[in-house]
Image (tube, rainbow, N blue to C red):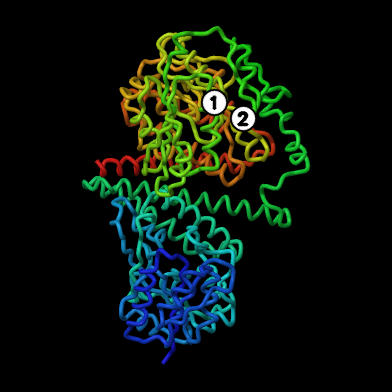
Amino acid sequence: MTTVSIVVCCFADDRWSSLVAAVRSAWQQTLTPCEVVVVVDHNAGLLARARRELTDADVVENVHPRGLSGARNSGIAASHGEVVAFLDDDAVAQPDWLERLAAPYRDPRVAGVGGTIEPNWLAGRPAGFPTEFEWVVGCTYRGTPTAAAPVRNMIGANMSFRREVFERVGTFRDGIGRVGRLPTGCEETELCIRARQRLPETVFLFEPSARVAHAVPPARATWSYFCARCYAEGRSKAQVSSAAGRHDGLATERAYVQRTLPAGALRGVGDAVRGDASGIVRSAAIVAGLTATTLGYAFASLRLSVAERSAGRSLVNESVAERAARRSVVNESVAERSAGRSVVNESVDQAGVGAESRAAARPPLASRPDAGATQATPDPEAASMRFTVVIPTCGREDRLPACLDSILASSHAGFEVVVVDNAPQTGATRRLLAERRADKRIRRVAEPRRGTAAARAAGLAEAREPYVVFVDDDVIVDRGWLAAIARAFTAVPDVSAVTGLVLPRELDTPAQRWLEQFGGFGKGSRRLVFDLGEHRHPDPLYPYAPGAYGSGASMAFRTQALRELGGCDTRLSTGGEDLDLFLKVVLGGQRLVYEPAAIVWHRHPPELRSLRATMFRYGAGLAAVMTKWLLSDPRIALEIVRRLPHALRLALDPGSRKNAGKQPGYPRHLTWVERGGMLCGPFLYAAAAWRARRER
């Protein structure tokens, strides 16, 4: 009889009860294992507890690098059975699991056997979650064989290998697979491909009757996790393809993409036609998941190929010229806009702004309280205005204090500050503001629904003053910022909204300079007025012109007018809610002013990885907003469709005003990241809208 060891890897204290259940199910098998080995991945406290309480298991620590691959390799080394079976610490095996898993090993050609992994949705299955993507939560999915059949690889939560495989081809490869809670994987795929390449006579078998139930916590039942996991899977597939070759690395995926996913998308549409409204959400999720996976694969492949060509240098390594440019960044021409002058020295007095803006254009320093001090003629009406300043923040205590300090130092006296805590469960923002409890101008509001749209909606609901201003937590405002906003409301008749000039706080990294080449946030040094009458702009995309109005990093509204327009749309969870607000103002027959004297300095993402995420959000947010307005009114839909050729030319033409500022070193893949976001945006909006209807 073949002897079988069961290896259970764990890393998290909060999964203790699941670990105990997994070990208990391992011992309650109709085929008794020769041992159960529990591997603790670099967690001394959990290791001590497991050794103290799991007395029926061999508890060992991961002696390899942190991560699931290293933990499994430690389990292999500590076990003795002829077959090593792996069970996740949040999975529970059926009583006959091991017996059915071990039976196929009677055939000497069988090198590994895997089984069915059924999702145990702890908070209920999301209505729009497609069965074709249950691999996202570590389970078998539609497209997996329904009867015993050879497969390329098994899924890690329920799999087993002959020990001979490890002895002949090696163990799981470090650098691929999950580390902690990072949603990566594919380490078992790479091992199976490597084994088949070196031992072509072997077979890996899927046995659907060998079943385990895999816990899916609420955190993994969200659309944000869905997209992140798909993107990470694409990256992992790129690593596998690089190691094993594209033919073997993507053989199963080709059939899945060509047959399983199209059939699933059509099935969802058919379900919607038959009255199941969640069918269209499932179809949208399939498209969004495929897009995110493809983007992850494309960017990781590009990075790997560049790394290979440059003999190990990272994609973000700068050339000698770029390194020199970083040392003298203030002299760099950002997209040649300043004709050799630094952007912070751009002449704003051409717009009649005067000495205040020239002073404000200097870099913000806490030691210079006079920065931006107004020299303009006093305006009694503007000076009497009262504002609620809303700052959404998501536990970023490294940025919020500087933002708060700059606002509290404002030369305009009439304001309160509402800090919307968008990650209240961490307690970080609450602790930070506790140190400022003596300042009665500051209030904290908790908003557990993640996303800037939800946070801004919560801030608007809490606003007590006639004017509400939204500012991001990663900006520093000029001392005259609020005063300039107030004057903009009085300088032009019937103004309902004001945006300001957003300048970069630094341009120290390539990623920060690339964002400026993309277009940045500043909209020039001239005051601009937008409406549907005498200030209707000649832009062929107007009024649906993205980026024309200003930035959500600094925008102000008449509080009552914004509430009457419906406020912030929380369905725009992917971004774009600021453009949606601007469209509400202008299409609602009201007037918006861009005021360059209202200056804030924004900290651009310093890393390429963060910039990619920003670009994806820009694309997704823009497409989500356009989708919303397309569906809002047939007349608006017709106007948008008529402008579509201009929009495509703006997005795709290298010489368009959108793309002309991108210098030769600008990474092409960033453009494709943004376009990928545009593809995903409509589906992400549809999913968010469906979720909002269900909640109501």
Q: Are marks 2 and 1 in contact (CB under 8 Å)?
A: yes
- Badge number at residue 366: 2
Quadrant of the drawing holding the C terminus: top left
Is residue 536 at all visible to an observer of this figure? no
x then y, percent, for residue 679:
45, 41
Looking at the picture, tell me which residue is in the foreground, 30 or 286: 30
Q: Amino acid at mark 2?
A: Ala
Disc 1: which residue: 409
Determine whether, in the image, residue 233 is placed left or right of residue 375.
left
**Crowdedness near tag 2: few (<14), some (14–19) or many (≥20) residues, C-alpha within 10 Å:** few
Image coordinates for residue 587, horizontal then vertical, percent: 37, 20
**Type of residue at label 1?**
Ala
Picture coordinates of residue 387 (x, y %)? Answer: 42, 22
284 up-or-down from 599: above or below: below
Q: Secondary structure at mark 1?
A: loop
Image spot of residue 444 (x, y percent)? 40, 36
Q: Residue at x 43, y 78 (%)?
A: 52
